[in-house]
Amino acid sequence: MDRVQRKIDLSELLYQLFWHALYCILMWAWYRVFLFRCFLNLSLSESRTLLFCIVISSALLGCMIDKFILKKEIHTFINMMTGFGIYAALTYIKIKPLLIILSVVVSLVLAVLNYILTTRKRVTSSENHRKVIIQRTYNALSGSKAIMSLGFGVIIASIGIPLIIGGFIARPTVSPAKTVASQEWNISNNIEELSLFFDEEGWDKASLTTKLNTCQVLANVCQAELGINELNVVTANTSDIIAGYYNDQEHQIMINLDYLMSASGPDVCDTVIHEAYHAYEHRIVDAYLAAPEDMQGLALYQNAATYMKEFENYQDCNSLDSDDYYAYASQLCELHARIYAEIITADIENAVKEYWGETNG
């Protein structure tokens, strides 16, 4: 009988270990693809090690509490999610401070209230007082543990769902311009918002949403200036060597999250204008393709023909190798975007200086 029992226990243990490992692998892969960020100034390998230690510690501690203290079913998924949620809170606190602080505080308050309400119920005289108190304490701990895990789950879901559905972590509250009404969306009418790019102290202290709103205002100005489609500014985790890129399928300017948070205002301004010009280049290609065949040879469309060939065989910059960067930077579409961004950035800076001069004067 003992041998049979030990065999059953061993089989159950192996079964649980298998599912624990599978959960960990699947969640690790999902988190690594969508949400992973390096922690503060730690390297990639150090950050991965920290994430692994937090997740494993959370899983082991949670399983021990479930098995030996609460004596209930082990909640593998919840225990691991808590670990990923803790790491997400640590790495996204500067990006989503309100979400994370509110989620943690609300979860903590609800967990404490649950513990108090569960353990403070009156024990009738007919009940075993000590046994009831112990059982209620276990139930209270179990409920509070689940509430805290849910709070960290909310953090992961709030950051992860937009990434899965829309491919971004955050977007501005300012709406993209629906029309090219130049009277509304020009530099002079939006000079106060655009001046943030050239206010070093103000830009460094600005929140993620404020920076994104300023970028969206600039994108709207570019849209009106160039007479193109709407431009949607968003931010997400991208390659460290990419400041931003333009997705023509979604009319989206994607800005690297770390770059947006750490780069200077003028550099971010230049990046938004650069990517907006790529949208203009795509519209030039559309005009070229829509033109009659006997008109496509006009000098007017020479750049368009080059842009189209470059877009079809685009040389992206995937490394810091000099040859790789030269292939990327020497493309005509990139050269023209850089020139245009430098000119417009300088125009905005001069307009801001003039505005500050008038305001201070």
Image: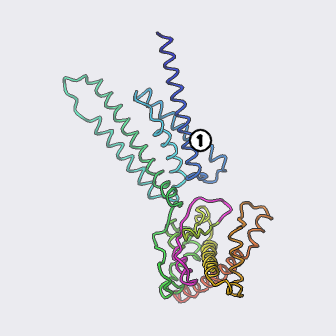
Give the percent coordinates (x, y) of residue 336.
70, 79
Region of the chain picked out in magenta, as a range: 216-242
Give the percent coordinates (x, y) of residue 206.
52, 68
Report the amino acid beneath label 1: Phe
Does residue 226 belong to the magenta stretch? yes
Number of numbered discs visible in the structure rendering: 1
Give the percent coordinates (x, y) of residue 280.
61, 79
Direction right: furthest residue: 323
Quadrant of residue 303 within the rendered picture: bottom right
Using the image as rendered, state which of residue 251 and residue 92 is in the foreground: 251
Left or right, residue 12 beside residue 47: left
User: How is colour applied across the structure in the image?
Assistant: rainbow
Does residue 232 belong to the magenta stretch? yes
Q: Secondary structure at mark 1?
A: helix
Quadrant of residue 131 within the rendered picture: top left
Q: Is residue 265 above or below residue 358?
A: above
Direction top: furthest residue: 1
Left or right, residue 202 beside residue 47: left
Q: Is residue 34 above or below residue 204?
A: above
Give the percent coordinates (x, y) of residue 215.
54, 73
Within 10 angstroms of label 1, few (less than 14), some, or many (20 or more) residues? Answer: some
Direction left: furthest residue: 125
Query: Badge 1 is on which residue?
Result: 52
User: Residue at coordinates 51% horizontally, 11% vertically from top-left?
Assistant: 3
Quadrant of residue 205 within the rendered picture: bottom right
Q: Is residue 73 above or below residue 117?
A: above
